[in-house]
Image: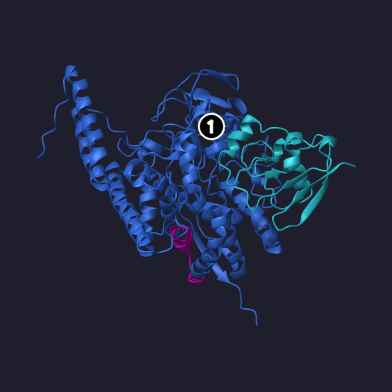
Chain colours: A cyan, B blue
Amino acid sequence: MATMKFLLHDGSSREVPLIDGTSLMQLARDHGVPGIDGDCGGACACGTCHVVVGDAWIKAAGPRTSEEQQMMAMTPDVQPGSRLCCQITASAALDGLEVRVPEYQM
Amino acid sequence: MKTSIPLPLPRVLEAPARNLLDRALASAQSRVPIPLQIKSLHLLLKAKQRLLNQPQFPVPVEAPIPPVAEVALDDIDVSNPFLYRQGRWLEYFARLREEAPVHYRPHSPFGAFWSITRYDDILAVDKNHEDFSAEPFIILGTPPEGLDIEMFIAMDPPRHDAQRKAVQDVVAPKNLQEMEGLIRTRVQDVLDNLPENQPFNWVPTVSIELTARMLATLLDFPYDDRHKLVYWSDLAAGSAEATGGTAATDETFEAVTDMARHFAKLWYDKAARTAAGEKPGFDLISLMQGNPDTADLIRRPMEFLGNLALLIVGGNDTTRNSMSAGVLALNQYPAEFAKLRAAPSLIPNMVSEIIRWQTPLAYMRRVATRDLMLGGQFIRKGDKLVMWYASGNRDERKFERADDFIIDRPNARQHMSFGYGVHRCMGNRLAELQLKILWEELLARFETIEVVGEPERVQSNFVRGYSDLQVRVKRKVAAV
């Protein structure tokens, strides 16, 4: 089965199965991955599921949506690979994906 | 009467007089020191009001509000500042959600406005800052002229983004780590000094005291003067024309003058201390002075005042009323209190549920930037829309048994009290932290926390809070 990894701020990591059609935020919540708040439940309206997609995966994960871009204007420490992971949908094409979870969500 | 009352000017002279007065106002704003500026503004505005015979905003007078079933849909006016106080708000908003989720009210003391009352519609409006502007104000009415200071909560991107970024670090999670210990010590201090076995008013004793201490820390404001912050903030959000509140315009002007004087002093004192080699702190003024975008903010007085006022208003009524609401809710739902005692690990989720259940700020206002359709209604460019978070938080389409207080509600975190989109509350994590610590320390100390008597609710269509909540506490017997 396709899987992905959340790399946590404390250096540990969590591997979760990629369930087709589910957002990465939801996967993180369902598997108790710490550091992904997802306050708004996936509406791209709160900015608290920020992850940084590894360089090699930026293209596969896709570009930020315009809504996402707006929310991220407020996010501290935005990097080229920064995404709101409620806007990334799991699929087999992301098998092996690694994303970094920032120290804080805001 | 000693003073002569100027007669209204003939209509032909009105426009020139208005121009002249407005020019005088503008020139005062660019040259005079801030506190003097506000004082002179007040005098000029009073003169303008008399000369042009501008009507005073009518003082809201309380009258019994009929049950919603007796009112025609078109006659429903949820801007009534007594709706919450009289306990009628639940039925009024329930009916709007059912029968007219995008409801037009052509006449109100605050002008015409649309009410958006369902969760999903509110979310859609809040996320769409291009069609729905936060300018010029986020409250239903218009603040008294001259007190309409500039706050980024009422600005659209990109101006909003630049200003917010300059100050948001003061309440960012990184800064919170520095504050957690301090917050806990203060909570312990306040709780250890509560009277036992005799009723006291929870609002000033706990809720106001703790939020005042927090505000003083965020601003590095003289600790002994901390209650001034509360006083100024209460007045700033409480004028009749803005929210149907009880603050008088003259008193508010005096308070804002005093606030301007204190904040200007705070700015220059901080600059002098930094120049003398003191390490900059984590407070708001230090952050502003250290950021190139805001290092000279003192030269833009209305913006400077606006940013500080926004922070004190944002951290005042909101957390205060959630601190009171938790006690009230747990008393109204004793089974939840028992659940909490059995599982204190529910505190973080309960904090979200308290904030949902109370919704300390009932709404935010927007203005349509173009003609558009919303919920089957035709909204015109320039129309005011009110996103009633208090109603969205009780929408059964989103929350099961929405009126009930359920501390382990699975989607409590999805409440709308912080707003959504670019204006989402930046102090949300600090608010949650304060409430979490309060409840941890309360559970550790008290056997019972009993509400004894009906709470007194404030008069406002915006702030949903308590002025009096009589509580009696009983300490736990110390473990041997």
The location of residue B142, given as percent across then percent down, is 37, 33
Q: Is residue B67 left or right of residue B252?
A: right
Q: Is residue B200 inside the magenta stretch?
A: yes
Residue B407 lies, with reference to residue B381, above or below; the image says below
Q: Quadrant of residue B17?
A: top left
Q: Identify the element where label 1 is drawn.
A: helix
Residue B8 lies, with reference to residue B60, above or below; the image says above
The location of residue B433, given as percent across then percent down, is 58, 57
Question: Residue at the left extreme?
Answer: B2
Q: Which residue is mark 1?
A: B68
Q: Is residue B192 left or right of residue A98?
A: left
Residue B274 lies, with reference to residue B406, above or below; the image says below
* Residue B465 visible somewhere in the drawing: no
Residue depicted at x 57% and y 64%? B449
Residue depicted at x 53% and y 61%? B179
Tell me the quarter of the image containing the N terminus of chain B: top left
Chain letter behind tag 1 = B
Residue range (magenta): B192-214
* Residue A62 visible somewhere in the drawing: yes
B381 or B422, which lies in front?
B422
Q: Quadrant of residue B12?
A: top left
